[in-house]
Amino acid sequence: MTTVRYFQVVKQLKKIEIAYGKKETRLIILRGTHGAGKTQAAFKFCWNCQTKCTIIAKLTATTKDSLIDSMKRLAIRLSLRFPAESSDTGVNVIQSMALLLGEYFNHKHRSKFSYLMLIDDVRLNNFSTDSLYDFISILFEKVKRIKFIITTTENDLFRDFSEEMQQDIYFDGMSRNEYMPFLRRTDIFKKESDNNIDRLVQTVGALPLTLNSARKFMGTLNMSIECYLKGMAELESTPEKYTNAIGESAIPPILISLKKIINDIKKENEDIMEVIMCLRYFDFKAVWPDILEVCCRHFAGNKYSPKIAAVTIVNNFLKYSLCHFVKRSNKTMLSFHAETMLALKLCDKQENQKSECERLWFLIQVFCFEIDIDVRIDISLDRNMLFLIHARKVIRELEKNEDIDNVADEDKVKQRRVYLCYLHYVIGKTILFQATDIPLAHEHLMRARFLCLDLVKYSSDLAENRCPYLEGTEDIPDMQSNNLKEAFKSLCATQMGNTFAEAFVCSKYRNFRDVQILRKASENQNVCKSGYLSKADYLHLSKNHSLALSLDLISEGFLSELMLHILFDNGRALDELMYVANDKGHVKKGMDFEFKTCIEFSDLMKLGDKFKEYPLLRYLAQDRGEQSYKLEKEYKRPSTESLKRRISDMREVKGNSQKNYFQFGILKTSANAHDYYNCQCYRLLLKYHQQLYKLSDSNETLSEGRKDEEEFQKILIKMEHDKKPYKWMEMPKFYIQCAQFLHLSKKTEDYEMSLEFFQKAIDFEENRGVYLTRCLWEGYFGKTKCLLLLKRKVEAKQISDQLRKRLEGTNQTNRIKTLDELFD
């Protein structure tokens, strides 16, 4: 949690400290209008409490979605598996989260700790607060040393707790003793009399947000109070200009500052106004500044420098204190107040430039072009995560909009649906690789699959919008994909048009690795400047080097390739879900269905003549055959013969991969850039060697596997020492597989080498700050087991105790049990 720079200490801060110090007071409610300083006072108090409380957590309750999202972040931080939402209201999931937290906080090793939870911006009109009341009541009942601070504008909220337990603190603005020194520290006010300052406060009000806005405006423009009050009088003479149809009014000083920004920017570049108006659709409390730059790029193309335009916007808002910088995930973000967004909305009403729906669709396109489909490397995953919270908010706003498809042009409706489908897919894939919320990844992938098949009116189990595998029913649904060939033909026949294809070629952001591959293959170091292909770049790649498909082919193959991606990654999501599911049968059946369909779909695509010279990158995963292997294991245990066949096939596949592969029409991997693919092949080879050795106990198997393991190590060492600005996200998987194979020899030196590999996997995951992922768990578990085999029991026990401490009181008791079994 952060407070704004130069936070003005208000009188209520002392009241919060006194209330918190009372043993019987467990609920402190900060009430007051927007801009009264409630959140900042709460943040400041929480910051001061860091030494008093074991855990200080912040939840945001502006809407049901924001509450659940912030609960998920807390669950991830505490290594809790977030409960599945079983009703559309979200009530059950909120109550379930309270029970989980109660068990975690009240565990015998934590029961004497103190906890403080801030629930910010609770609003009655956005969702029923009954579930929030139940959430607090459950935690009060289960956890004796927990206290809550709530900020709200509502006077009637939470009146059911006893007077001893609850204390209300009202934020009614700054007193004279507070606002005088606050304003006097700005030079312009040092010349003003006390009477003039009192007149200003009587006119604009004593709210910290209001006074700060007026202070910055007057200080920036070197304006006297008299001059400022004249401007206020003009504004107040036309109240309809700052009040909307439902009676919401903008704070006049903020509106004055905002109008000044708009007028100044209009003089420089009127196009930038559209980007400013898009701000209110983002999660405006943490906006990555580069989002403004990419919006400028996509809105105006090459008419002006996107970077300069974005800097202009940011500098103007900072100049008048309408936003401030905050730190989120080691990134500097812009944070805007809700009142600034309301003022922006009312200004937009006067400007009346574009419909809300048009803006939302524009942002959907921006996110499609900017969120990288290739999250195998860390720089892409990290960049994607900065867009995700905004993209998900825009999708929610769009799906609530009644005019979602209110256009006469059928092609435009179709294109919009494809953009929405693609965005759900890349969001799902990003979350899948982030590995902290697999159910949410699966939810987005399911939605993408439904939208893609709905475009061609395909109806089957494959097109179900909701996943039937996680419902907890006794009957496992019998999934079938009827007439898959017909669906494939329909997708291929649904062409997106050359304009759409060109937009996806020339507007799509390409990561550092993509750019380097294109430059090397085309022998042109000027290709793809700033990460985007120009039309000239595209023509150069397609005509001179056969490194890009024609727009006709891209248009024809777009939907079928997208469908293949969705099927493959949804299968992966189900595979991950099976790892943690209570009822593995449901999820296993779903995973098998998805992989089987993906294999069939891929085979149909490979039979087509038009794309034979442009094989898809996705084929490589199909050629490795891991999906087929998992399907085979469902029907029979792997035999010695089947594993030997797998090893032989894998060697052949690895040798045949040295050619160019494409993704949505553009070269993705060249013949001399297959290190990642080779790592995947060696990972599977070692996996099959490992399983074969367990069946045959043959030294010959161990010897063959050793050769593959040594080759694998060489590639991994090379990748580790590459001076490229990215790392492969699946490096921990590779390290863990090497370590597990080395265990087989039972030699001390191999155990020592295994330890190194497990530690590398642990370091990689811990450095990401993603808490207890599957790879991190496997790394720690493998290291503990290895230390025991080396008879270093004290070190093993230390790791085990650390893991237990993270897991005790969580709903991951199966992992604690697995740890205990190591020491039996």
Image (tube, grey):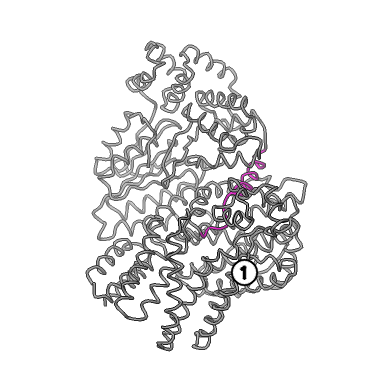
Residue 307 percent across, percent down from the top left: 56, 37
Q: Nearer the viewer, residue 420 or 561?
A: 561
Q: Is residue 364 shown in magenta?
A: yes
Residue at (36, 54) in percent of width and height: 138
Q: Residues within 10 Å of mark 1 (few under 14, many from 20)?
A: some
Residue 163 sits above or below residue 316 on the image: below
Residue at (26, 56) in percent of width and height: 111
> Across the whole image, how many numbered discs are drawn on residues?
1
Give the side of residue 475 with respect to residue 40, left or right: right
Residue 275 percent across, percent down from the top left: 60, 36
Q: Assign the N terminus to one quadrant of the image.
A: top left
Give the side of residue 425 with respect to residue 7, left or right: right
Give the side of residue 680 with respect to residue 485, left or right: left
Q: Which residues are magenta?
A: 355-376
Q: Nearer the viewer, residue 778 or 453?
A: 778
Identify the residue under disc 1.
619
Residue at (47, 52) in percent of width and height: 68
Q: Assign the C terminus to one quadrant of the image.
A: bottom left
